[in-house]
Amino acid sequence: MTATLPSAAVLGARAFAALAGLNRFTDEPGKLTRLYLSPAHRQAAEWTKGAMEVAGLTAFIDAAGSVQGRREGATPGLPAVLIGSHIDTVKDGGRFDGNLGVVAGILAAQALRDAGIVLPFALEVVAFGDEETVRFPTDLSTSHALIGEYRPDWLDGTDADGVKLRDALVKFGGDPAGIAGLARKPGSLKAYLEVHIEQGPVLEASGEAVGIVTAIAAQKRARVRVTGEAGHAGTVPMALRKDALAAAAEMALALEEIARGHDQALGTVGVFRPDPGATNVVPGAVDFTIDFRAPANQTVASMDAAIQTRFGEIAARRGVRLEITPYSQSKAVPMDEGLQEAFATGIARTGSNLSARRLPSGAGHDAMAIAAFCPAAMLFVRCEKGISHSPLENMTELDAGIAIRVLLETLLELARGEG
Ligand code: GLV
Ligand code: MN
Ligand code: MN
């Protein structure tokens, strides 16, 4: 049955060619920046829809901006196995984060079609658009739309330029009123599979091309605003200042200390914007973000409490006002054990030199949202030096091909399970 499927080398070459096509679309020439609902996101979505059609899927760009493709199984209307990931990126991001998983799904669908294999379930591929959550204060909004858990207040969130998500979505060609209609019917998805670059060093260190994700870490994100008093840098005595930036800087360091003090925890201030931001003005306000994570839910809860206390103390001591507005929170999400086993079989059938290492994910993924709706699992691919969210993110062509071959063998294993 599998003799007619392409080799990992061929699949890898196809994947890199497809990624080169997809990654031409960027909002910042010379870098890969593709924020949710930007002009580059629209172009990338159209490219993805075209690639899905070439692979034999019936495709469309949905009301929230995701690209969805489907090919029916042995009989029309069967529940689907959904393969997905995202095509939005962070600012100046890597080529593989999200994009690899989308291309993997499309190339797997194409290989099955070319081999004349008809599955006992429908096959769907989705390219989500709001995984990174770096433009608007949302929480995996496009994957939540698919499972009927889109929060209408996300539409009123604004980006750094004050643009509302609702307006950006309309400009993109989406339809805020159509989002509720994206919710899948219970039972319509059999499984969700996501291939993703590891974004960490574990597989490289152990010499393995792919690994199976056991669980995704808990995380919380918030926007923080500190308001002090703007003043003249040459006249306001140090003792009388209410310098919002100095207070915010102390909070950033406190977050670092809190993360270091918790088991396997991480804390990051990734955005930091002083207002007005001029050399000779004592900063009157600062907007910054906090992102904190840990494998255990109770660790994130304990960090949350410590942040409230420490930030509150710093604000009171410095006489500044503090507003913390959480916008995204996810509990740790275990991956489906049956699908982890299916991936392990897929790995074994791909190559006797491969092992089915299990590893947790510290990064967030659309699989976290979808796991609340149907069994979900992820396959990680080795990442050069563990570097991600950076233009230096890299992997080998062969590893990409091995991952797609494993995905194909896993789909065939799920098909066998139906038989
Ligand atoms: C997504 O890449 C995240 O974990 O921030
Ligand atoms: Mn990602
Ligand atoms: Mn990412």
Image: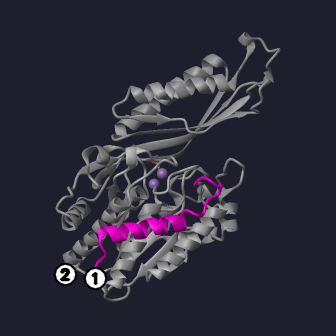
Q: How many marks?
A: 2
Q: Position of residue 358 (x, y in %)?
A: 24, 51
Magenta stretch contains residue 268: no
The residue depicted at 63 percent of the width and 63 percent of the height is 40
Q: Quadrant of ligand 2?
A: bottom left
Residue furthest bottom in the image: 75
The magenta stretch is: 5-32
**Regarding mark 1 in the picture, which secondary structure is present there?**
loop
Read off the residue under disc 2. 419
Between 278 and 382, the residue placed more toward the observer is: 382
Read off the residue under disc 1. 120
- CB of mark 1 near ligand 2 (< 8 Å): no
399 left or right of 240 in image: left
Point out the image quarter for the N terminus. Answer: bottom left
59 left or right of 30 in image: left
Q: Is residue 228 above or below residue 183?
A: above
Between 201 and 67, the residue placed more toward the observer is: 201
Disc 1 crowd, CA 10 A, few/some/many (<14, 14-19, 20+): many
Q: What amino acid is labelled 2 in the image?
A: Gly
Q: Position of residue 305 (x, y in %)?
A: 45, 31
Q: Is residue 123 visible?
A: no
Q: Is residue 279 above or below residue 412?
A: above
Q: Position of residue 244 (x, y in %)?
A: 68, 26
Label 1, label 2: how many angstroms apart (C-alpha)?
8 Å
1 or 2: tag closer to the N-terminus? 1
Q: Are marks 1 and 2 in contact (CB under 8 Å)?
A: yes
